[in-house]
Image: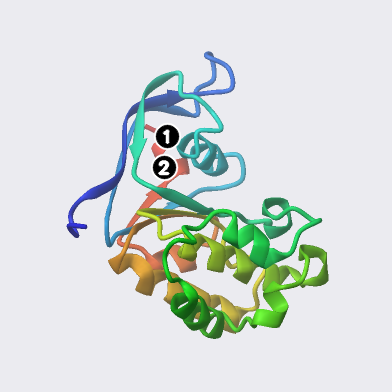
Amino acid sequence: MNSQEAVLTIKNLSFGYSKDNLIYKDFNLEVKNNELISIVGTSGSGKSTLFELISKNLKPIKGTITSKKVSCIYQDPYSSFHPSFKVIDQIKDVIDTSKNLEEKLQALLEKLDLSVELINKKPHELSGGQLQRCSILRALLMEPNLLLVDEPTSALDNIVAIEVMKLLINNLDKCGMLLITHDNSLANWSSDKIINLNELQKD
């Protein structure tokens, strides 16, 4: 993929949970391959709403959202895994198993400090930090063009969080990334561009 190719384009987006109280009005955004853009703002500013709009769980009142292949990393990993099935089976359900991904799987397991034994367990048998790293593993194995990432390091200690963010950034040669966070220091450290929704809503 061309490094300058758009993986997400939002044009003239308007959305609100009521038409009299719009969270977004004529909002535009483009994320390119090899680019990390952070969306920051206080609680209730619309960060997670934007995530849901891009994921097509919500429909805009006006405007268009177009994207290439998307994978998501959610803030609460327990909500993104079914409790009754092994983690590895839920990973295999969403990846292209026709490709030989064994080598990539092994490399990512090592980088995320995971093991084959661990991913053969059910979600409730893992800690929050372990399961969040499994969520990141699954998202990367899906080989997306766009990573939608919602507070990816909130369940991780500081040292592991830095290593995980480095891994995500190193993957940007293959995709673009939209990071939703309340952590301004994380956004400043990692981003090519930062959009502050609180500032946007003052306009």
The picture quadrant where one finds residue 114 is bottom right
Say which residue label 1 marks.
Answer: 202
Q: Secondary structure at mark 2?
A: helix
Q: Is residue 41 above or below residue 14?
A: below
Q: Quick check: can you spot residue 64? A: yes
What residue sits 68% from the left and 59% below the top? 77
What residue sits 42% from the left and 34% below the top? 202
Say which residue label 2 marks.
Answer: 199
Image quadrant holding the N terminus, namely bottom left
Label 2 to label 1, Cα distance in Å?
Answer: 5 Å
Residue type at mark 2? Glu
- Percent x, y of residue 118: 71, 78
- Percent x, y of residue 45: 54, 39
What residue sits 50% from the left and 39% below the top? 55
Residue nearer the viewer, 59 or 119: 119
Q: Secondary structure at mark 1?
A: loop
Q: Identify the disc placed on residue 192.
A: none
- Percent x, y of residue 131: 69, 68
Mark 2 crowd level (few <14, some 14–19, many ≥20, 10 Å Cα): few
Badges 2 and 1: C-beta atoms under 8 Å apart?
A: yes
Tell whether 119 sits left or right of 16. Answer: right
